[in-house]
Amino acid sequence: MDIARTPSTPDGNPEMADAAHEVTSPVEIRREDYRPFGWLVPQVSLDFALGVERTEVVATLEVERNPAAEPTHVLHLNGDGLVPLSVKVDGEEVNSWTMDGDDLVITLPGDRHRVEVATRIDPSANTQLMGLYASNGMLCTQCEAEGFRRIAFFPDRPDVLSTYRVRMSGDKAMFPVLLSNGNCTAQGEGAGGTHWAEWHDPWPKPAYLFALVAGDLVVRKDSFMTCSGREVELGIYVRAGDEDRTGHAMESLKASMKWDEEVFGREYDLDLFNIVAVSDFNMGAMENKGLNVFNTRYVLADPETATDGDFDGVEGVIAHEYFHNWSGNRVTCRDWFQLSLKEGFTVLRDQLFSQDMGSAPVKRIEDVRVLRGVQFPEDSGPLAHPIRPDAYREISNFYTSTVYNKGAEVIRMMRVMAGPEAFRKGCDLYFERHDGEAATCEDFIKAIEDGAGLDLTQFRLWYSQAGTPRVTVRVEHQGDTATLHLSQVVPPTPGQPDKQPVPIPLKVALFDRETATHQGEHLLVLDKAQDSFSFRGYARPPVLSINRGFTAPVSIDSQVTADDLVFLAAQDDDPFARYEAMQELVVTHLKDAVAGTLSAEAREAGGRAIAKALGAVLADPALDDLMRGELLILPSQAYLAEQMLVADPGAIHAERQELRAALAQALESEFVALHQGASAVPYSLSAEARGARKVKTQALIYLAEGNPQLAAEMAAAQYRAADNMTDRQGALMVLAGLDSPERTHALLDFYNRYKANPLVIDKWFSLQAGSLHPHALDHVKALAQHPQFTLKNPNRVRALYMAFAVNPAAFHAADGEGYRMIADLILELDPLNPQTAARFVPPLGRWKRIEPGRAGLMRAELERIAGADRLSRDTHEQVARSLG
Ligand code: B3K
Ligand code: ZN
C-alpha cells in the first residue's frame, strides 16, 4: 500500500526522527520521543497577496537558538505541498537549504537570524480543506493540527509560540472583508481595485491558531463589557442573507463570556472577538485566537430552519470555542499527545455551561448517551487508545470521542472527588502557573493536586490506560447492615493486555423499598480490584442506586432485579439514576431476548415490567417534558451491541423494534394523549415548549411501530401544522421510515420548501439515509446521484453517508451491500479529503464484535481499501489499525 503524502520527519524535529521509517507505511510518532524545538520563533510576519487560484505568501521568521534544546545549526521547517520560491537569511538570498521530503531545511551560521521564505499556493485546488482554501468564493484557513505547513514553511508544532503580524491585500470587490487574529492595526486602498489590511495579535500563539479570512461577508455586531470594565467588540460574519439567523449565536457568545468570568474567573483578553461562518468545513468549528471559524451549522439558527437540538448545538459549540481562549490558547499543548489537555477540559467546561443554561439533568443524560453510543464502542474496539495516546501516524485520527468526551469525564471525576470549589482552586492554579505556555496533561494533574488538595497518583492511570472499566456490585444484607461488594476490571485493549485498577468515584444511595427514601448520598472511591463498603441502619434489604449522576465513565453490572429497576425508574430522586434504571431495564430484557434465553412467559413478563415503568413515566405529573422525553428514549442500537461480546445487528434491531411495538400497543392511548396535549403548546424556546416538542416526536416514534397507519396520519398532520423545524423534522423523520403515501408527499414538500438552504437540505439527505424504511439503502444510492449531492462539501457527505453508516438496519444489510457502499465512498473521497474519508473507517472497523457472517464481509471491505494503490496517511492508519 502506498501513501499519497511523503512521510515527513515527525514534527519537523530532527532529534525526533524515527529510525524505523518505512517506505510503505507512514512514520509512527511517539510521545516519549518529544524533544523541544532547536529554535525559538518569537515573531512572525506573514504577507499575503490573495487570489482564489493564486495566493503569494512571504513568511518572515525571527529565529533564535532555544537555550532549552540541544544546540543545532539546522532549522527544520515543515511544509506540505509547498515549493520555496526564494529563501533569504538576514535579507540575503541563500542557497544553504535543502528539502527533506516536503520540509525545508536551512543551515544557519549564528544564534539569531531573520529567515524569509516565499511560496505560492492555489486555494481553489485545496479540496482537503486544510491550510488556506476557497469556499464559495471566499478564502479561509484551517490550521489545526498541521494545516499551517500548507500555507508557509514553519515549525508547525504547538510548542513554538510566536506573535504574528499579518498583512493581506487582494481585490476589493471580491474580498471586501479582510480578517485575521488580534486587532486590525491599519488598512488602505491599493492599486488596480485592491485593498489591504494589517493585523497584529499581541498574544504569542502556536501556528495552529493562526487564521485568515477574506471574502464578501456581512456582519452582525454587538459588544460585551468584561468584568474589569473593558468593552469587547463582537462580530459574526456570514454570507449576505444569513445575518438574520445569527441572533442565537450572538446571545450564546455573550452568555459564554459572562459564564466563564463567573464560573471559572476567566476574562477575555482582546478588544475584538470575531466569528466567521463557512459552509465547507471539516469539523464543527475552530478556536483561532480572536477569529473563530465555524461550520455554518453551528452559527445559523432560527425556528423555521433549526431544531431545538440545532439551537443547543450552536450554543454548545460557540461556548466550546470561546472557552478555548483560555483552555487551549492562553495555555496550549506541548505536543499533540496532550490534546485532551485542551479538548477534554474544554468539553467539560462547555458541558457545565450548557447544564447551567438549560436543564442540568437532561444535559447530563445527553452527554452520557453520546459517551456510551460513541466512546464506549471506540474504547472496546480496534481503535481504542488512552485519552493521552502514546503514538500516532496521523494526528487528525486522534480527534476522537475518547480524547474529547472521555477526556471530559476524567476531569469531571477530579471535580467530583475534589468538590466544585476545590476544583476551581486547582483550575486557577493551572491557569496561573502555565499562562503563556505549552503545557502537558501532567501539568494539569499536578495543578489540580496542588490547588485542590487531592492525591492523584493512582488516578493518572486514567490518562495512560485505554478501555472502559467494568464494575460489578453485589449487595449483601445482614441484621441492620448493608454491604456493597464491588470489584473492577479494566479490559485489555490493543497494545495494553494488562491493566491496573483505577480509582472510580461512585455516588451511591440506598433506598428503603417501603418509604422510597434514602439516608443521603455517599461518595465511594473504588481504587482496588475488589473492595467492600458497609452501611448501618437498614432494617430491610435496600434498593441500590449506584453511579448517580454518572460520576464515573464505567459500565456497571449491578445485578439489580427488574422489580428494583421499576422501583428506581419511578422513585429515584436523582434524575440521572431514574433514566439509568429505565435504560437498564430495557438493556437487560433485550440482551436476553437477543441471546434467545427468554421463555415466552419471561419475554411477556419483561415487556410488562418495561410497560409499567414507561406508563409511570408517561403519567408522572412531577416530571417535566424535557425529562420525560429522555426517559422515553430506548437505549441505542450501538449501546446495546456494546453490551454483547459478539453482536448480531439484525437480531438487535428486530428485538428492539418488537419491544417498541409492544410498548406502543400497550400504551397507545397514553401516547396519543401525550401527543395531543403537547400539540396544544405554542412555539417558544421555553423549557416547557421544547419539552412538548420533544415528547410529541417521541410519541410518534413509538406509534410508528405499534400502529403505523395512525402514526402516518398523525405525523402528516404534525408536518402540515408545523410552524418550526423541530416539529417538521420530527414528523418527517417518522414518515421517512414508513411505507406510506404521506411519506413521498412530505419529502417532496420539504425539498421544495428548503432547496435553497444547504443546512436544511442536509437534513433532507440525513433523514432518508438514516431512516428505518426497508429500502433505505437504495434510497441512499439514488440520493448520491442527486444534483444537490457533492463529495466536495463535508456537511453533505456526512449528511448522506454518516447517517447511513449509523443506520442500524440498512448499514448492516446481511448481504454486505451497506459495507460495500461505505468502502466505495472511502476510496472515492480519500484523494479529495482524507480527513473526512478516514472518519468512515470506524463503522467498518467494528467487525470483530459482529457475528461471523457480517464480520467477514466487513473485513473484506477493509482489505479492499487496504489494497488500493494510493491511500492517505489518515485512511491508511485507520484501516491498518482496524485490520490489526
Ligand atoms: N480544535 C478544533 C478541532 C480541530 C480538528 C482538527 N482536525 C475544534 C475544537 O475542538 O474546538
Ligand atoms: Zn475543542
Image: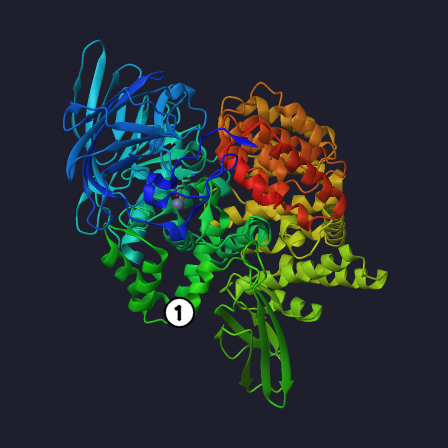
* Tag 1: amino acid: Thr
Q: Splitting the image into 4 quarters, where does residue 454 fall?
A: bottom left
The answer to whether 846 appears left or right of 232 in the picture is: right
Q: Is residue 718 visible?
A: no
Residue 87: x and y in percent read 23, 24
- Number of numbered callouts drawn: 1
Residue 44: x and y in percent read 21, 34
Image quadrant where one finds the N terminus: top right
Q: Nearer the viewer, residue 419 or 106?
A: 106
Residue at screen point 31% across, 39% down? 209
Q: Splitting the image into 4 quarters, where does residue 171 fall?
A: top left
Where 146 falls versus 334 (above or below)? Answer: above
Q: Nearer the viewer, residue 169 or 90?
A: 90
Residue at screen point 52% across, 74% down? 528
Q: Which residue is mark 1?
A: 457
The answer to whether 416 appears left or right of 540 in the picture is: left
Where 21 falls versus 45 (above or below)? Answer: below
Q: Is residue 20 visible?
A: yes
Residue at screen point 50% across, 70% down? 506
Look at the numbered disc 1 and give the secondary structure of its residue. loop
Q: Nearer the viewer, residue 812 or 105?
A: 105
Where 100 falls versus 711 (above or below)? Answer: above
The answer to whether 584 appears left or right of 123 in the picture is: right
